Image (cartoon, rainbow, N blue to C red):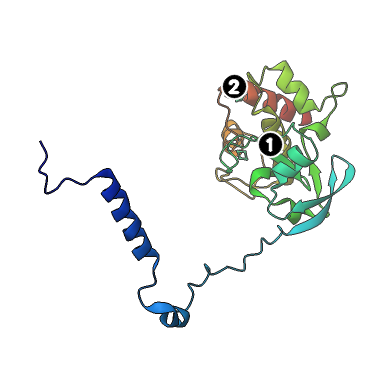
Amino acid sequence: MSSPDWELSRREFVAGGASLSAMASTPIFGTAQAADTPAPSAAPTRNVTMEANPMMTVTMDINGRSRSLTLDTRTSLLDALREHLQLTGTKKGCDHGHCGACTVLVNGIRINACLSLAVMHDGDRVTTVEGLGTPDALHPMQAAFLKHDGFQCGYCTPGQICSAVALLAEIEKGVPSHVTDDIAAPMKLTNLELRERMSGNICRCGAYSNIAEAITEVAGAKA
Ligand code: FES
Ligand code: FES
């Protein structure tokens, strides 16, 4: 039961609300004071201009063919090959220099294409697995990998093959490795040298013994 003292009729309540609204909309300090009050400034606008990504043109000899690309300077050689030239034989495994799946030859020397910017290779000669041989005329290393089943899923294989080709060139030139005992002696492809020099190429399928057999056979044939 409500007390009559506190009871407001619907009409009184609505009338009271209207009075309060009128008070709220009346300037408390009058119009002069309101004119002196600076209008709240609009939110500060930051003069942000989205700078275009720096682009650069690079020309490389890729698998015997001159290719010019205008690239964002941050493009890795791996992405230039795969995304811009559709040379997808070179694989992206880790994109961090850990697995060797992206190994290509630059001027005959193997590198991890994921760790190198494409614009650093203006004028360079780049060889990918597509440039080593063709399906009808395989490179001896490609043929040996096939013969010895040097792969299972095949994802690491292009990198393994490029690495193996460069490895034999290193041995031929007498380039020492961390396990070379005598750098003055003629370089030989021992089992230890082979495993050390191929240690940057990871095979998750574990086809290592067959890969070693394939490389040894090609090295033997060369010898
Ligand atoms: S993708 Fe380059 S080292 Fe793994
Ligand atoms: S063959 Fe599968 S990762 Fe090497």
**Horizontally, is 11 left or right of 122 in the view?**
left
Between marks 1 and 2, how big is the CA–CA gap? 15 Å
Please tell me the numbered disc located at residue 207: 2
Q: Which residue is located at x 65 percent, y 26 percent? A: 155
Q: Amino acid at mark 2?
A: Ala
The percent position of residue 46, horizontal first and vertical second, equals 58, 68
Near mark 2 (Cα within 10 A), the count class, few <14, some 14-19 or many ≥20, is some
Residue at image location 59% in from the left, 21% down from the top: 207
Return the mark for residue 136: none
Callout 1 amino acid:
Ser
Q: Position of residue 160 (x, y in %)?
A: 67, 31
Q: Quadrant of the N terminus?
A: top left
Q: Is mark 2 within 8 Å of ligand 2?
A: yes
In this image, 113 relative to 85: left or right? Answer: left
Could you say whether the residue bearing mark 1 is in a helix, strand or loop?
helix
Give the labeled residue for mark 1: 163
Q: Quadrant of residue 19?
A: bottom left
